[in-house]
Amino acid sequence: MTLALEPEALLALLEDSGANESSCVHSRVIPQSTGTTSPWPEWVSPSLVSTLSAAGITKPWRHQVEFAQSAHDGNHSILATGTATGKTIAFSAPALTSVINGGTVLYVAPTKALAADQLATISGWGLDGVRSATLDGDSSREERQWIRSHANYILTNPDMLHYSILPMHRRWAHFLRHLEFIIIDEAHAYKGVFGAHVAMILRRTLRLAQKYGASPTVLAASATTGNPDKTLEQLIGRAGIAFTDNYAATPERTFLFWQPPLLADGQTRRGVLDESARLLAATVPTGHQSVAFLRSRRGVEYVSQTTKDLLASANEPKNQSVDHLVRAYRGGYLANERRELERDLRSGEIRAMAATNALELGIDITGLDIVITAGWPGTKASLLQQVGRAGRAGEPAAAIFIAREDPLDTFVINNPDVVFDSTIEVSLPNANNEHVMAPHLCAAAQELAITREDIDSWFPPNAPDVIAELVSAGMLRERPTGWYWTKSENATDLADIRGTGGAVVRVVEMDTGRLCGYVDHGASHRSVHEGAVYVHQGETFLVRELDLDESVALVVASHLDYTTFARDVSDIRITGESAQRQVVAGIDIHFGDVEVSSQTVAYTRRHISGENLGTIPLDLPVRTLRTKAVWWTFPSHLVNVTAEVLAGAIHGAEHASIGILPLFASCDRWDIGGVSTILHVDTETTTIFIYDGLEGGAGIAEFGFEHATQWMKATLAAVESCPCDIGCPACIQSPKCGNGNDPLDKAGSIQILTRLSGLPAQ
């Protein structure tokens, strides 16, 4: 059967008949928009116009024309509109026209999958004179040689620019000499430390293009963001024009705010993963196509398998195998697996998919009937990006936000106007990050000596200070003609642009030698330590050994009835203070540099029933992170809590603050860490730290320092509004606490947050 996606019918389909209450806390119908078109400018290639007309696109949307015209006029420009608003056509009109007329174009995407998806679109248009190709880690030696010799539209990623094209720029001289456009797709993905790396890579690219006599125009496409013009300026060091008005037609969408039902104990709610699987399973027999976006790789595998199990037990769809109808998609899959999944999702063969945001940034997929976002995805911009995947022309669609038991989700579910009426978050790459800048200045000097004019033209204002430090360290040498790289090794190896902490760890099956997937080095301690349970496309493996020297985790296929959770311990030291102010008398807030030491010391095995099967110690190395933090200092008598509950009070306040900060800063809970201590060695008083979880800082803690009062008041409201008595995952418990959420004290946390908000003690 196929069910019309009207609100009443949709609710009837999705509600759990066994629940005692409705799970839909709030619903809103976003009406259909017909859109506004404009004629093609005369300069657009007639062959492109003809091709698009044959595909049914006779007139572009008005914002596409305005953006394309700005690009054609030579203005660096960024188009920041929602999903399915035609950004590809907007930047393709000037870019492909220039290629047809003899120029070259460089397209940069954050993922290989998105570049491959764009290549399929461009190749499908079949334009004479356009020789397009993807250049990534999967490209063979023969393919790379052909691309260098013949391609005039290259689709790549920041990694290939950094490690391959820029160091060997002389081989790419012809391409760079004729470079007319650089396209930065999904520009909102380039924030924080990763964004700082990409900003330096793009500036190096523009510098080399200029040396070869080119002056390319930069075009950026982004999801809706609060400051697209500043994003572009930080990425390329040049001012640009932002286009944010959306004139595209949009389908009617029903937006549901969903809270999983209470379980039999009347205290806890069904987990967001189980509820996501139940909703996916409910949609499959109707014939609709649904995707559930989940926060973790582990969650994706669990939801995919649970959905299959629910459908199989109900014999739905009738007489059909569910193994191909329901699939998982996440980072770490092999290239051939990703390509197959992307193809089958587009064709409709896959009816339901559980995915991380690797899919959100992986392929330009729209036209889904139902999109489920399981838990706040980090930012409002990301939520809208996911929701925008729902809806095909003229057909209604649905978006469902499922709230986890988490302070931020609790706040959003009770304040839906946060989604509909608040401004989009600020999303900036931190181009001035000295830790990031230093290795890229070394790489730039190895590519071509850095001149004083280069410093003024292409690099951030604090670049001279960083260069002076590199000279003192013997990394660069100053000569009358500029600064030169002094070492024999490749300078590009100094930069860890993805922030993974080292080489990617391969997951290999011991018995067969089969490569099962990949895990970032930084995540390997927690996810593929010895004894960890690793899941890949429904297959369960037990990790026998993690060899960090060889960057390989050896696994064996196993049927297990438990899963594993790693436990960490952390310590923090203050290495420099940049700013300080008083909250109220005796309570101060600070911002500065810290050094965080962390170690994965044990893991807990938990049975599928929830029973704790014990904790097993681990012997893994200590990791050190130099980053930025915001911290509060105060004597305990000012916060109206007793000595017995102080540790639990500050611990709970720390957790809740981390949970709410992503509502204000453009970040994810997993981008932030925290430490709270009754007596810190550096401050000699009670201290709560919130720090950026990325080397050198990502601007998150600084944003928190600047907006601390608003942040603390929202955190206080979230904790106070939670109906629990002693603290739960919806208020002061944390899913990533290295101490197992012990100790915690909710009443004490409320007192702490009251004072940190600048309010009098209760």
Image: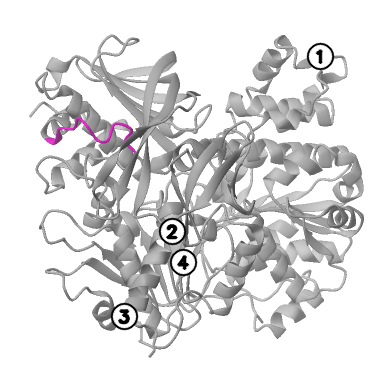
**Residue at the location (78% across, 65% down)?**
96
Marks 3/1 in contact by CB < 8 Å: the verdict is no
Displayed quadrant of residue 232:
top right
Which scheme is used to colour this image of the protein? Answer: one colour
* Helix, strand or loop at mark 1: strand
Q: Does residue 66 appear in the picture of this structure?
A: no
Q: CA distance from mark 3 to mark 1?
A: 73 Å
- Which circle's residue, 3 or 1, is located before the other in the chain? 3
Q: Residues within 10 Å of mark 3 (few under 14, many from 20)?
A: few
Q: Are marks 2 and 1 in contact (CB under 8 Å)?
A: no
Residue 230 location (% of width, % of height): 56, 42
Q: Specify whether residue 116 is in view.
A: yes
Asked if the stretch drawn in magenta spans residue 738, the answer is: yes
Question: Residue drawn at (74%, 32%), measured in percent from left and top?
Answer: 492
On the image, which quarter does residue 464 sit in?
Answer: top right
Vertical order, 126 against 357 (above or below): below
Tag 2 residue: 300
CA gap between label 2 and label 3 equals 21 Å
Residue 531 versus residue 681 in the image, above or below:
below
Image quadrant holding the N terminus, namely: bottom left
Query: Dot 1, crowdedness within 10 Å: few (<14), some or many (≥20)?
Result: some
Q: Which residue is mark 3?
A: 314
Whichever of labels 4 and 3 marks the residue nearer the N terminus, that label is: 3
Kindly identify the amino acid type of the residue bearing the numbered disc 3: Ala
- Mark 1–mark 4 Cα distance, whole angstroms, equals 51 Å
Compared to residue 125, the image places residue 168 above or below, namely above
Which quarter of the rendered picture does the C terminus lie within?
A: top left
Query: For the magenta stretch, what is the residue range?
Result: 736-746
Q: Nearer the viewer, mark 2 or mark 1?
A: 2
